[in-house]
Amino acid sequence: MHADDRLAAIRDRIARAAKLARRDTADVTLIAVSKTHPAEAIEPLLAAGQRDFGENRVQEAQAKWPALKDPYPDARLHLIGQLQSNKAADAVAMADAIHAVDRSSLITALAKAMDAQDRRPTCFLQVNIGAEEQKGGCAIADLPALIAEARTADLPVAGLMCLPPADTEAAPYFALLAKLARDNGITGLSMGMSDDFETAVMIGATHVRIGSALFGDRPVVRTPTGFRKRA
C-alpha cells in the first residue's frame, strides 16, 4: 500500500471513530510520527496533504526538517519525545508544538527560550498516567502544581499528553487523562497511537500520534548482539 493510501485509510478510521463519538473529525489532529524515518519516506505524505509530523529528538529534526519545510512551509513539527532542558532553545526555535513537558526545570528553560526568541510553540504537559518508573511524565498528584507553574511562566498550555502502559487496555488511562484535563480546565488531549488511536478518538483525543500504521515498522539495524529496531 502506498503512503497516500495508508494516509487515507487512517483518516477514514479517525473519521469513523469521531462519528461514533458524535465528534467533529476536524477536532482531531493526525500527527504522523516520522521519527527514525528518512526524508524520502516523509515527502510522499507531505505531497498527499499531511501537515503535522512528530519527531522524538531535536537533533534528528534539525537534520531533516529545514529542507522538508522549504517546499512545504505550512508543515507543523511536533516534538513528542523526552526533552532535555539544555535542548529547550533548539526545540523552541524549530517546533510548533512540544508534547512532553513534564518538570519544573524544563518549564523554566522553555519559558526563557520563548521569551528570548519571541516564539511560543504550544505545549502539552505529559502525565505518567500508569505511574511507571521507566517513563517520563509528572505524577498525577503533581499535575495541578505543574499546570500552575506552566501558566505562571506563560507557557501556551494546549493540553495533556500520556503514554499508557504497554500491553494493557488503554481506554481507562485515556479516560483518566480526559478527566484530569476537564478538572484543570484544559481541552487538548495528545493520546493514542497506531494500536489504539480509535479508542483515543472516541474518548476525546484532539491529537493522535501515529507512526507504524503510516510508515510501517521502524528501520532495523544490526547491533553487536543482533538486530533491533532503531530508537
Image (tube, rainbow, N blue to C red):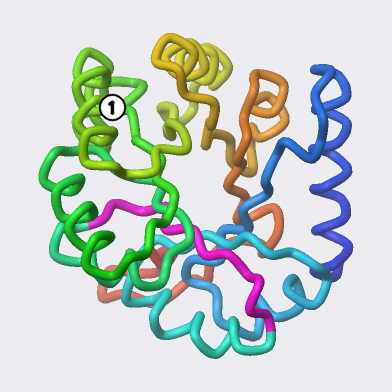
Quadrant in the rendering for residue 138? top left
Left or right of 33 on screen, residue 1: right
Point out residue 208 in the picture as x, y percentages from the top left corner.
Answer: 61, 41
At x 74%, y 71%, the residue is 45
In percent of width and height, residue 193 lies at 59, 41
Q: How far from the left and from the top, in percent, is residue 41? A: 66, 78
x and y percentages locating residue 26 in the rendered image: 79, 40
Q: Nearer the viewer, residue 77 or 116?
A: 116
Image quarter (top left, top right, bottom left or bottom right) of the C terminus: bottom left
Q: 39 and 49: which one is in front?
A: 49
In the visual, does 100 lie left or right of 46? left
Q: Is residue 51 left or right of residue 19?
A: left
How many numbered tags mark residues here?
1
The dominant secondary structure in magenta is: loop
Quadrant in the rendering for residue 52: bottom right
Which stretch appears magenta?
Answer: 72-83
Residue drawn at (51%, 80%), measured in percent from left and top? 65
Q: Residue 109: name its quadrant.
A: bottom left
Using a 10 Å C-alpha cutoff, classify the residue at mark 1 as few (fewer than 14 neighbours), some (14 to 19) or many (20 or more).
Answer: many
- On screen, residue 147 above or below 216: above
Name the residue tied to disc 1: 147
Q: Is residue 188 magenta?
A: no
Q: Is residue 75 magenta?
A: yes
At label 1, which amino acid type do we have? Answer: Ile
For numbered disc 1, what is the local secondary structure?
A: helix
Residue pictured at 14% horizontal, 48% vertical = 108
* Quadrant of the drawing holding the N terminus: bottom right
Q: Residue at x 13, y 39 (%)?
A: 104
